[in-house]
Image: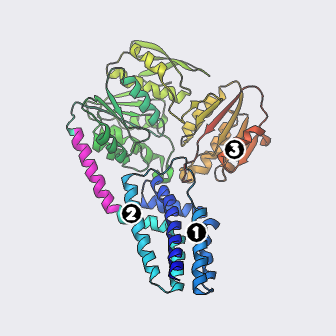
Amino acid sequence: MIIAKIAMLLCAALNVALQAVYFTHMLQLNSYRPERYRKWCADNDKKIVQVRTMLPATLILAMFLPELYSYIVSAVVLLITALLNIPKKAKKPLVVTARVKRLFVTEFLLAAIILTICYFLVYLRAIGFSCVLSLTPFVLVGLANYINLPLEKAIANRYVQDARHRLKLRPDLTVIGITGSYGKTSTKNFLHALLSVRYNVLMTPESYNTTMGVVRTIRERLRPSHQVFIAEMGAKNVGDIKEICDLVSPQYGIITSVSEQHLETFKTIDNIIATKFELADALKENGCLFACGDNLHIQNRLAQKQPLCPTVLYGLQNGEVRVTDLQVSLAGSTFTVSVGNEEQTFTTKLLGAHNIQNLAGCIAVAHHLGIPLSEMVYAVRLLKPVEHRLQLLPNGYIDDAYNSNPAGFRGALDVLKQFDAQRVLVTPGMVELGERQEALNRELGAYAADCCDFAILVGIKQAPPLKEGLLSAGFAEERILVVPTLNEGLQMLAQVPSKGTRIVLLENDLPDNF
């Protein structure tokens, strides 16, 4: 009897552990923010309440069996539930950081306490508590995160203070902040390549664009030999950019763009504008702001309020640093940049007007820091697109799968439109756009009608408005395919009649928490 009871509790523990890994992953993707995790749970109730997670509810029936058989049946049901809930391979796997390890410890202790109590209860209550625990691992993860918050804040504050101290020891270090609704990571990589022509440059890696990502970069990678530090600054809430600026005190700043993105947290475009310009507000009089002169929101904001420091605009239509004679082909792009009396023609493998726009901003900064245009020609020629951002692959696919936004989506469609080939769009649409999500997906569907020959729409949430937009613009319904998953969408490509060369745009790939 005791062995059967222990077996049941061990199966319950295994089930909770496997599901806790999944929900901890979702918590991490929601930046460990309790309010965002709660909203994710509410929005994804169908992922939480489904057959493979609700099997323990059948243990109510097991309670009517004799005690020994109740334990055996419960153990079997809980084991089956655990096996069905083994986490699947994720697009962006759970990163087992020190914080995650601390979360696992707290989750383990909470589960151990409950299961220990279960062991000393009479069998009906033991089975009942095991059932409830097995049904609510998402609550366990949320509770563990809440319990750990004071500790995590204390640890984070200590790391922030250490990073701030390290920067104070480097008054000679030139710090450049980069923000924008899109184009931050690409701009950061381009600028790193151009400045490396003359300087020893450190940049925040990958998408380390939060305060703690910047802190980690400083503490782990900053060396006395570095002359320039480029910090990518991301934001989903008002004040996020200011928090990073208070840490690194940038001398120079680049605002790549302002558009409707992360509206679920920002709520309004005015909040987005204010947040991006927290970088401009942080710059001192001896610094310089570089901003995209083609962006209407940036133009309007600068017309209302100029930062304390000088401002240099760049772009394809407006700005002191201007791109002209832009030509795009399968081989890449050729363009000319003018800065004052200096003019230089560049060739690059990069695709897309907004990539060239971002590159113009980097050229402006590098030139301001003393690098002549002629010295940048070779570095520009060697530039490669950032992975999953308008990356032209050898098989004719354009990989633009990184989380999309309206302006970036339009830019990618413009690139697809330029190809003289059969053009296929594969997309699940856009997310994190709040109340505007459906309308914006419908608008992008209409815009896509003139840019592709076939459209494969992925998922059940964004596909309907995308399809409505395509049809409203006169796109033939027989050229639209709707599938539940990206893998099925790629398989459906075989059913699209092929005529000569085919170019496939993979636009956006929803993160694991969608």
Q: Nearer the viewer, residue 373 or 287?
A: 373
Label 2: element kind:
helix
Q: Position of residue 69 (x, y in %)?
A: 61, 82
> Which dot marks residue 489?
3
Q: Are marks 2 and 1 in contact (CB under 8 Å)?
A: no
Give the mark toward the camera: 3 or 1: 1
First to last magenta residue range: 149-167
Q: Nearer the viewer, residue 93 or 288?
A: 93
Amino acid, disc 3: Gly
- Please tell me how crowded label 3 is: few (under 14), some (14-19), or many (20+) other residues with Cα within 10 Å: many
Which residue in the structure is indicated by mark 2? 105
Residue 469 appears in the rendering: no
Q: Position of residue 62 (x, y in %)?
A: 62, 81
Q: Position of residue 77 (x, y in %)?
A: 61, 72
Residue 418 appears in the rendering: yes
Seen at 28% across and 44% down, the residue is 246
> Which dot marks residue 79?
1
